Amino acid sequence: MKATHHGLDNWMYNTPGLDTLRIDELILPGTHDSGADKAAPSPTLLQEKTQDVPIIEQILAGFRVLDLRVVFSAHAPADSDKRFQLFHFSSSGRTVGGDVLDPLNHFYDDPDNKATRAKEIVILNFHKFKHFTRATHQELHKLINTKLGSRLIPRNWRRSTVGDIWTHRPERTVVIAYNHRVRAKYWKGVEHQWSGQNLNTTAELKKFMDEQSARQKPDFALRSIQCAKYVLPLHVPDDFSDKIDAWFDSRNSNSYIQRFHIINTDWSTRSRIVFNCMHANGVRAMAKADRLNAE
């Protein structure tokens, strides 16, 4: 299923009030196992495919958090993109350099859209690592910093609002969340709220989400809810977009979506989650303004 953009490539720029929120306060649409798409070059099992379109299409469709699981291939030449590939159970053939970092630079540098896309903040959540050593992590850091160094939002800016970043360092648009202890200026890895089971019923998943939403998120930390599950008999990622649209329908400050921050889904471009996040951020911004005015 091809993603349709509907101008969603610059939705953050077009969302009133969003600039008053910190990055960790935003309600962001994310893709689960972002590199495991149907168009990936390496053949993989049906059980591994979680997205319809490549990462750049996910970004163009408005998704702002990417779940990246990286496997290191020591047999690939030192200057090859194939050294750092994305995997689910096995490698999808997608690479960090060729399918994430380079397309993201092109997204921002597109001359026809450069002004508006400059306000789109993307979180690259490096979540899992396979066949990594200390030296391998350092090599990946060098790749990230070489490709995106001038765009990175340092972790010590986590107290800043989006508006502060837009005003004072507008060229800084990318957060690297890195789920491994590093000395680089990356943000701590996103806390994934996952049930620990793939085969949940829809009711069981919703109950888990209800329970997790009651846990207060620490200020300045990044947290995601894994709104994804598998289904029998083939044990494949389930498409329950109708439920996702219903659960996260954003209407007012009492809407369920206000309990969350990053919402990761499978088959993400099939739902209206981006539209609901757009509206929900405006609602959250108004609630924050009311709270600050009352103090």
Image (tube, grey):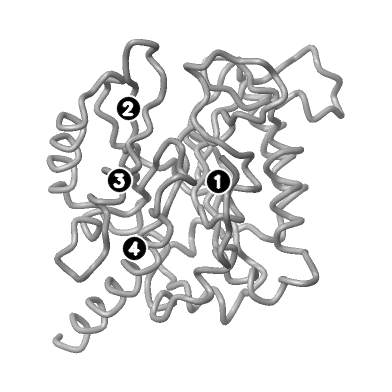
Q: Residues within 10 Å of mark 1 (few under 14, many from 20)?
A: many
Vertical position of residue 214 compared to residue 228: above or below: below
Residue that numbered label 1 is attached to = 124
Q: Residues within 10 Å of mark 2 (few under 14, many from 20)?
A: many
Give the label, 2 or 4, closer to the camera.
2
Give the label, 2 or 3, closer to the camera.
3
Residue type indicated by callout 2: Lys
Q: Secondary structure at mark 2?
A: loop
Q: First in sequence, mark 3 or 4: give its number.
A: 4
> Alpha-carbon distance for marks 1 and 4?
17 Å
> Alpha-carbon distance for marks 1 and 2?
22 Å
> Alpha-carbon distance for marks 3 and 1?
23 Å
Choose between 171 and 236: the one closer to the eye.
236
Give the label, 1 or 2, closer to the camera.
2
Residue type indicated by callout 1: Leu
Vertical position of residue 203 compared to residue 261: above or below: above
Q: Which mark is residue 219?
A: none
Which of the 4 image quarters holds residue 87?
A: top right
What x and y, as percent, mark residue 131? Answer: 61, 15
What x and y, as percent, mark residue 114? Answer: 72, 71
Residue that numbered label 3 is attached to = 244
Which residue corresponds to the image point at 57% horizontal and 18% vertical from the top-left? 130
Residue type indicated by callout 3: Ile
| Apparent side of residue 288 relative to residue 267 in the rendered image (left or right) | left
Vertical position of residue 86 compared to residue 143: above or below: above
Vertical position of residue 57 compared to residue 230: above or below: below
Residue that numbered label 4 is attached to = 25
What x and y, as percent, mark residue 188? Answer: 44, 44
Residue that numbered label 2 is attached to = 229
Q: Secondary structure at mark 3?
A: helix
